[in-house]
Image: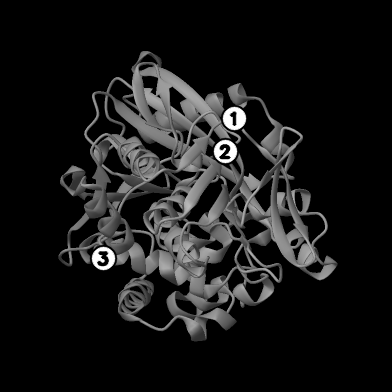
Amino acid sequence: MAADKNIAVIGAGPMGLAVGYQAARDGHRVTIFEADDRVGGMTAAFDFDGLAIERYYHFICASDRPLFELLEELGIQDKLCWKETRMGYYYMGQVHPWGNPIALLRFPQLSLLSKIRYGAHAFFSTKRQNWRPLDELEATQWIRGWVGSEAFEVLWRRLFDLKFYEYARALSAAWIWTRIKRVGTSRYSTMREKLGYVEGGSETVLDALQRAINEAGGTICLCTPVERVLHKAGKVQGVQVAGAVRYFDAVVSTVPIPYVPRLIPDLPEAILAQYRAVRNIAVVCVIVKLARPLTRNFWLNINDPHMDIPGLVEFSNLRELPEHVIYVPFYMPGENLKYQEMDEVFFAKVRRYLRNINPHLKDTDILAMRASRYRYAQPVCGPRYLKALPPIQLPIDGLYVADTSYYYPEDRGVSESVRMGRMIAKMV
């Protein structure tokens, strides 16, 4: 597109902001429309009893190069911090060390052969470069073939079942592999890993992006949902906002794919059917403030028949915070009746789970709880996933649509949002 075109971006999450940032940097006029009262989407922060913190946890891995490049451009690369972190595994009523060869060998619930097979799978997954052969495979069969039935039942089954429910046997091996590789490549030795965070949290990045967009002449409109994308004779016309038409040369939608049929109902039926076929997992994420640490781990995998969570994140064991903060995510399909339960139901579970994990924890140690809900938190990525999606550039001149589904085989994350958003801006 020639310089100085008028571009609308729908959604001010990390990907929408990245589209706007790159387009404004390239000399275009940019307007970003956001239905929420703040930017950031799943990275947005809230006031948690005086502590500004994200509604959903985020961390940085050593492979997140698109994010590193953005931080440097924004002049905030000095805000990037690294910390050695630990993993644990709660199994049979006990927290076990996890995430390194010694911890695996000492884990009491597996045979030596299962431990060797599990370790080999993790090692070769971090060394693999080509994901294409895995695109054809179903994830649980791929993992079981490597680690065997014993290790799969002990270490993997409930992680799948308690996040994806009825979709647990319909996931792509390529998608699971990228998750293993991303964390695995954050190790700086066989025994130690480090993860990153930005000082001040995601707000630091979001604020810098907003400033850069505004300084380049862009506009961010909060509390301004787009009602419809307008097109005529094979060319985009603009958007409808509050009943009025705003004209644009190009429109980029970054909101969750399930919203697209409502935004652009007059797309070809074949494309609408592809959007409607995309499945997503919802999350109810309980964030807890404690008077004392729960464990020494950042991530704690959980396999317990009395807990309906696959794990929790003790975020204050990564980012330096004045209080101890834990995220407890309950994943489930949005159609599941559990998603309609009141927050207090989830709070009661979390109180019980935390005391089970750390029997020394008292009721008075739990200082505050909040719950955030996101209906389209995680796309269900099956084998050959990208082939089932419409192209980002639709057969309407000037119209582009993408969300976290298009990161495949990568998982959703800020760095992937930056990469994808900037790529789309260049496509425009």
Apparent side of residue 40 relative to residue 298 in the rendered image (left or right):
right
Residue at 65% x, 37% y: name it. Answer: 225
Apparent side of residue 106 relative to residue 125 in the rendered image (left or right):
left
Query: Residue 427, image x and y in percent?
Result: 51, 69
Neighbours of disc 2 within 10 Å: few (<14), some (14-19), many (20+): many
* Label 3, label 2: how far apart the Cα atoms are: 50 Å
Q: For the residue labelled by badge 1, is the local secondary structure a helix, a strand or a loop?
A: loop
Q: Find disc 1 in the rendering and name its residue.
A: 223
Q: Are the residues tagged 2 and 1 within 8 Å (C-beta)?
A: yes
Residue at 80% x, 66% y: name it. Answer: 233
Q: Is residue 373 above or below residue 418?
A: above
Kind of residue at badge 3: Leu
Q: For the residue labelled by badge 2, is the local secondary structure a helix, a strand or a loop?
A: loop
Specify whether residue 216 is in view.
yes
Taking depth in this image into account, of 294 and 127 the one nearest to the observer is 127
| Tag of residue 105 | 3
Quadrant of residue 394 in the image? bottom right
Apparent side of residue 378 relative to residue 218 in the rendered image (left or right):
right
Q: Are the residues tagged 1 and 3 within 8 Å (C-beta)?
A: no
Residue at 32% x, 74% y: name it. Answer: 126
Query: For the view shown, which residue lies furthest in the bottom direction?
Result: 133
Kind of residue at badge 2: Glu
Q: Earlier in the sequence, mark 1 or mark 3?
A: 3
Taking depth in this image into account, of 65 and 27 the one nearest to the observer is 27
Query: Residue 62, image x and y in percent?
Result: 25, 61
Apparent side of residue 360 relative to residue 422 in the rendered image (left or right):
left
* Label 1, label 3: how far apart the Cα atoms are: 53 Å
